[in-house]
Amino acid sequence: MILATIDEMLQDEREKLIVDIRKPEDFEKETYPGAINIYWETWEEHTEEIPKDKPVYLFCYTDMKARDIAGQMQEGGYEVYAIESGIQSYLRLKLSEMMKKFDEEETTCKDIERSIVKKFRKDIWRPFTRAINEYELINDGDKIAVCISGGKDSMLMAKLFQELERHGKKNFEVVFLVMNPGYNELNYNTIKDNAKLLNVPITVFENDIFDVVAGDDIGGSPCYLCARMRRGYLYSKAQELGCNKIALGHHYDDVIETIVMGMMYGGQIQTMMPKLHSTNFPGMELIRPLYLVRESAIKHWRDYNNLYFIQCACRFTESCASCGGTEKGSKRAEVKQLIAELAAKDPLIEKNIFRSVENVNLSTVIAYKKDGVKHHFLDEY
């Protein structure tokens, strides 16, 4: 037998040599993975390199030259086969595998989308739409920059906006905005891969925030400066794209933790508001559509769909879950644990913390002065 199909070659589990006998310039453009190049016109000069103790498979443009060489080599005692249809068979196989992967990803994406409005309708979809309506986060004609950090919260928020576009009544437009402030390659690729898997068409822009913060002598945690800079860049890019709102992925648990942190460590009443007009970017508004969604529900959605998102992409604490070893991160972790312990004893604790500030007029920020320093009753953070 001189001809062998590419499937037969793949089924041959023995150690084998794969040779592309096309011109070197064509070999360089694309070839079968692991193949070596011996141009057919110089074949006789390389016969000593061909082993007799393992099968050899030859790729050419079609299979004509490979058949001629395979016939000659077999007469000399070699086990050599010409791949039927040559390199075209590999290109067809590659295309088939790509289409299969695409179909699998398409199916996976549809299953993930279906889970949002079916399995997680009560715990995610309804709280999301309730926040949209109750706090009037979206109006007809809005163009919203949905800001994606790459974590579970912002990626779910992106999918929720897509569902809202499909099922909602509002006439609005979204841009899925990803800022790369200097992520390492692994985190950056994870964000892009997840966006592809979830069929989220991201718009990426880059800056050097991490480098700036790393080089700034702030004498403490870099988190505050980094957060402020990131917020400013997001507002600026969103405005450049014609957006009038940016959406951030803070959830219910972020809200109650911020309230407790403000009282315990800041000596002030402080919360994350569901919407906030920017003072530095006139006409821009920040909204938090996950305001009523519990973090446990987001984690359940992530795990149910076997998804993996980056935890913390900060260059300074890349292994952390929430700003890792920084003072701010450890305080938030302590507060999270404290709230969990209190809620285990009284399930109304979390709701009461949340309600403690929810009746404040959301359109205003009450300011006062103490020791010559201006403080805010409700902080933009």
Image: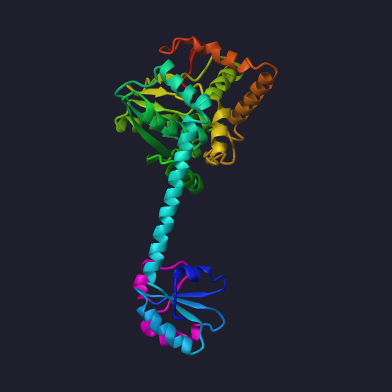
Q: Give the extent of the magenta segment.
A: 22-50
Find residue 39 and report its horizontal and vertical position in percent.
38, 79
- Figure coloring: rainbow
Is residue 164 rendered magenta in the image? Answer: no
Using residue 31 as the reference point, say whether residue 292 is left or right of it: right
Find residue 220 and report its horizontal and vertical position in percent.
56, 31
Q: Image height check: is 51 above or below 214?
A: below
Question: Which residue is farthest bottom?
Answer: 76
Q: Quadrant of residue 163?
A: top left
Q: Image height check: is 59 above or below 352?
A: below
Along the line of sight, which residue is nearer the eye, 48 or 159?
A: 159
Along the line of sight, which residue is nearer the eye, 360 or 213?
A: 360
Is residue 25 rendered magenta in the image? Answer: yes
Kindly identify the residue that appears in the image at 69 percent across and 22 percent down.
Answer: 341
Kindly identify the residue that appears in the image at 54 percent across and 31 percent down.
Answer: 298
Kindly identify the residue that appears in the image at 47 percent across and 86 percent down.
Answer: 74
Using residue 119 as the reference point, say whether residue 25 is left or right of it: left
Q: Is residue 266 visible?
A: yes
Q: Image height check: is 145 above or below 88?
A: above
Q: How many marks?
A: 0
Along the line of sight, which residue is nearer the eye, 271 or 90?
A: 90
Find residue 302 and report its horizontal and vertical position in percent.
54, 36
Q: Is residue 219 visible?
A: no
Using residue 55 as the reference point, say whether residue 43 is left or right of it: left
Find residue 363 and report its horizontal and vertical position in percent.
40, 13
Kindly identify the residue that appears in the image at 39 percent across and 59 percent down.
Answer: 95
Q: Image height check: is 112 above or below 52?
A: above
Question: Which residue is farthest right?
Answer: 345
Along the line of sight, which residue is nearer the eye, 80 or 22?
A: 80
Q: Quadrant of residue 346?
A: top right
